[in-house]
Amino acid sequence: MSQVNFSSTSSVSLGELGPTTSLQLMFAQLQLELAETAKTQAMDKMEAISEAQEEQKFVSQLLNEARQSKADANSGISAGTQSETYSNGTTEKNTKNCTLMSKEMVDYMDAHGLAYDKTGNDYNHSSDEWDVAITALEGRLEELGTNTQQEMVYIQDYMGQYNSYLQGANTQISNANQTLTSLARGQ
């Protein structure tokens, strides 16, 4: 029988032991990275929703303005009481039974391809002409609302992924701890 000398010490470098990180911990790290990605995507969607809500608020203001302008046109506002200077450099005054579309409304509608009546190649609108702009703004407001709802669905999905990845990481860390505890006990 050979004898073992317990009094001598041997130095073994970590490199000689092989990988010191368990597969469970590596998987946990991957799960945490995926959780961070899901969180980032959810945050991006939340920012998009915030921007869409600001735009919804603005479109609602434009819609209220258009409805008021239609009512003013119906009431027969006298000519020359309203004027506006537009980005194309023109200045217009309203005519009898018409009201002018504001510069902000023209700019927004042009930027988003929304329809408004261009009869007479001016921004004076009769009550009937305002109906076109009102319908376009209502459609845009509905579109923004639908998009916001879709973004919220995406956020819920990303948060579900986030929670799932965190739970997976937690499980793997727990499994790694159990393995290390078992090894420490010599089991």
Image (cartoon, rainbow, N blue to C red):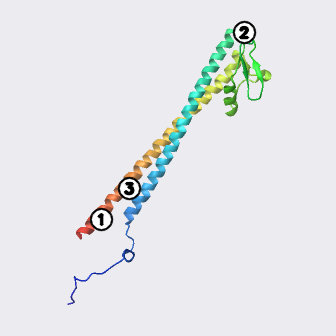
Q: Position of residue 172 (x, y in %)?
A: 35, 59
List the residue tagged with mark 1.
Answer: 179
Quadrant for residue 115, please give it: top right
Which amino acid type is shown beneath numbered disc 3?
Ala
Instruction: Look at label 2 and name its amino acid.
Output: Ser
Q: Which one is in front in this view, the residue at disc 2 or the one at disc 1?
A: 2
Q: Position of residue 93 (x, y in %)?
A: 75, 17
The x, y position of residue 22, in whole percent, is 37, 66
- Residue with the mark numbered 3: 169
Evaluate if marks 3 and 1 touch, with contact meaning CB atoms under 8 Å apart. Answer: no
| Category of crowding for the residue at label 1, using alpha-carbon neighbours closer than 10 angstroms: few (below 14), some (14–19), many (at least 20) | some
Badge 2: few (under 14), some or many (20 or more) residues near its Cα, within 10 Å? some
- Quadrant of residue 108 in the image? top right
Q: Quadrant of residue 24?
A: bottom left
Q: Secondary structure at mark 2?
A: loop
Mark positioned earlier in the residue sequence (2 or 1): 2
User: Which residue lies under the disc numbered 2?
Assistant: 78
Label 1 sits on what residue type? Thr
Q: Secondary structure at mark 1?
A: helix
Q: For the residue carrying disc 3, how many other residues have a C-alpha within 10 Å: few (<14), some (14-19), or many (20+)?
A: many
Q: What residue is rendered at 30% in x and 65% in y? A: 179
Q: Position of residue 118 (x, y in %)?
A: 76, 24
Give the alpha-carbon distance from disc 2 to disc 1, as whole Å: 87 Å
Q: Which mark is residue 59?
A: none
